[in-house]
Image (cartoon, grey):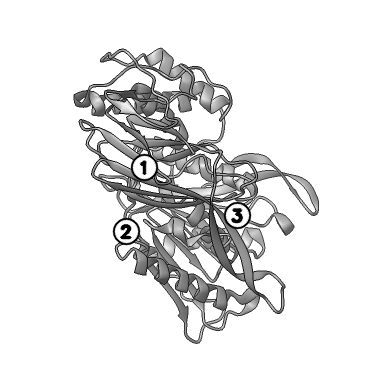
Amino acid sequence: MAVTLALATSCGSSKGNTSITPSTPHKTADVASIQAYFRASLASPRQTLPSPPSGIIASSQLEAARKTLWAEWQKANQATKGNKLPAPSPIAPQMPSSVWALPDETGTEGTFTAHMPFYYGYKGERPSSGYPLFLYLHGSGAKDAEWQNGKAFAGHFKDGPSMYFVPQIPNEGSLYRWWQRSKLEAWDTLLREAFLTGQIDPLRIYFFGISEGGYGSQRLASYYADYLAGAGPMAGGEPLINAPVENCQHIAFTLRTGEQDRMFHRDELTRITKEAFEAQQRLFPNDYQHWIELIPGQGHAIPYEPTTPWLLGYKRNPQPKSVHWEDFPVDGIYRRGFYNLEPLVRPQGTERVYYEEQIEGNTITLRVRSVQYKPTQYSPHWSFPMRYDKTYAPITGGKLRLYLSEELINLSQPIRVVLNGKEVYNARASAHWQALATSCVAFGDPLRLFPIALELSY
């Protein structure tokens, strides 16, 4: 069965452009088929893959099916060459480091190899649910000194028990950015590996950083929000075209900047970010948890200690019933999916697509629009845009995979999907091995193994 078909079975009627593929029920997984699919997906992501495993799963067998699937995902990853997480060491001044080889990087100075040294260590006794994981991104000073500062912070901050991943930027100059594509590969690997180890609490992953690391962690917070419990950029402040606030609906976000930190308008951009979070929280009072402040009397150096303890007060919501997602590229790279949404075809000529999803009972309401930015305020010193107006417009020509689970709907009842004001699906759907496998490949997340997937065109 081709991956491009809908991964659901129906008992009723469907409407619109949703495909339905019937299948024969069976109780056991085809382990060989699962392994072949997983290994192919790891060897050539997003390329033509063998058919995923097929067959309906009884509701009573869902948890057993997820355990079987996840065990096969672990085996497939263990058998695949590439960057892996080492055994963690206690955080200490003389702890060992490791290195990941990333794709070559090209900047204004030329093309360079990208080797990322990192410390991976823990403090405190491991909780039964696993360690909280912090990714710390350093500032743009001399990279050796900045990296050592990161290791010292990992030991100093009062956020134990916890695990830390502290990388060193591979290259400097124009390549001293934590959001460039070679580094995106590192964060994809880190998230996948963290889930695979079984040592990390999948509900408690946090990104944070200082200065250049503040810029990076703010962008990455919006880009990777569906994996995170929280994010804590410090001494930063990004124009919001680089970090749409809407995506941070279900994470805890803190941005702390000195009131007198005016270089590159860090103070003003922090203020703009605060305004945007406050506006979203007025619309959605239970979401957009944030602590954004300009610290009186402080410049670029601020007290860093409060951020990580505050973040630890929040856990991830891996399957929310409300999703707002601006699908935007970072260094030309789009996310494969976000929460329970996976774009299969993006409309031509549309750089950014905005998805709104609301689940009430067994009705899923989806709205998909294009996003355009118009600068309304420029920096008087550095010329870059600081504020924007956003406009939204209807779009067509796209295709979306919608994943569902018993956490989101009642699997025994018909599912109704309304897309851009039109009912496109109204039928029952059975749990299916294909949906579990494709969602595992899409997200690599043990808490997002979805048993139902519907493909919807708009």
Label number found at residue 36: none
Task: Using the image as rendered, state which of residue 319 and residue 15 is in the foreground.
Answer: 15
Question: Which quadrant, please, contains the N terminus?
Answer: top left
Report the side of 98 relative to 112 (left or right). left
Between disc 1 and disc 2, the foreground one is 1
Query: Can you tell which quarter of the image residue 291 is in?
Result: bottom left
Label 1 Cα neighbours within 10 Å, binned few <14 / some 14-19 / many ≥20 = some
The residue shown at (52%, 42%) is 188
Label 2 Cα neighbours within 10 Å, binned few <14 / some 14-19 / many ≥20 = many
Badge 1 is on which residue? Answer: 418
Mark 1 and mark 2 in contact? Answer it, CB < 8 Å: no
The x and y percentages for residue 458 are: 49, 39
Amino acid type shown at disc 3: Trp
Amino acid type shown at disc 2: Tyr
48 in relation to 392, above or below:
above
Task: Using the image as rendered, state which of residue 364 and residue 410 is in the foreground.
Answer: 364
Badge 2 is on which residue? Answer: 314
Between disc 1 and disc 3, the foreground one is 1
Q: Residues under labels 1 and 3: Cα distance?
A: 38 Å
Q: Residues under labels 2 and 3: Cα distance?
A: 24 Å
Q: Secondary structure at mark 2?
A: loop
The x and y percentages for residue 195 are: 40, 39
The x and y percentages for residue 77 are: 47, 28
Amino acid type shown at disc 1: Val
The residue shown at (47%, 38%) is 342
Which mark is first along the chain, 2 or 1? 2
The residue shown at (20%, 30%) is 412
Q: Residues under labels 1 and 2: Cα distance?
A: 32 Å
Q: Secondary structure at mark 3?
A: loop
Seen as rendered, the residue at the extreme right is: 109
Badge 3 is on which residue? Answer: 178
Which mark is first along the chain, 3 or 2? 3
